[in-house]
Image (spheres, rainbow, N blue to C red):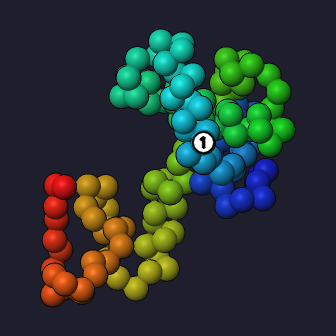
Amino acid sequence: MNNETKTPNTRITYLDGHTDEVCVTMWQRCQAETHAKVKGWGSALDAVVKLNAYAAYVRCRQIGATSVPFEQWADTVVSVVDMNNDPTDTEEQAETMNGPVPVSSGDMADAPGFSTGATGGTAAASVN
């Protein structure tokens, strides 16, 4: 079920089998980070699951999809999945594209093209 007027990027699956698709923005991610610091969850690497879940929870609160405390909401959730990195969605995208689909998250495949200005079409980097 889509509870959003914005393009959803996160799928929440609940114990009862229903799903919500919401648009988690940078603001919700920042709120999750702030909450994690207050609650002492550790670094982002220590609390990846909690941070993702809390960001989705904040969005659900903002759009009126829930009004219960985080812990109570999280107790009803099976998974929170970033739809942009969902293997199922990637397979569907691969079927509709006319070329190889980059799979490495470390490459620059999604970076904007380089300008062919003063560098003659090559990538110029500066630490300044």
Pick the front one: 80 or 40: 40
Residue 40 appears left or right of 120 = right
Disc 1 element: helix
Residue at (40, 85) in percent of width and height: 98
Residue at (49, 53) in percent of width and height: 86
76 vs 6: above or below: above
98 vs 42: above or below: below
Pick the front one: 117 or 42: 117
Residue 127: % across, % down = 16, 55
Residue 6 appears left or right of 46 = right
Count the marks: 1
Q: Is residue 17 visible?
A: no
Residue 85 appears left or right of 128 = right
Residue 5: % across, % down = 78, 59
Q: Is residue 84 visible?
A: yes
Q: Which quadrant holds the C terminus? A: bottom left
Residue at (36, 73) in percent of width and height: 112
Residue 109: % across, % down = 31, 69
User: Badge 1 is on which residue?
Assistant: 27
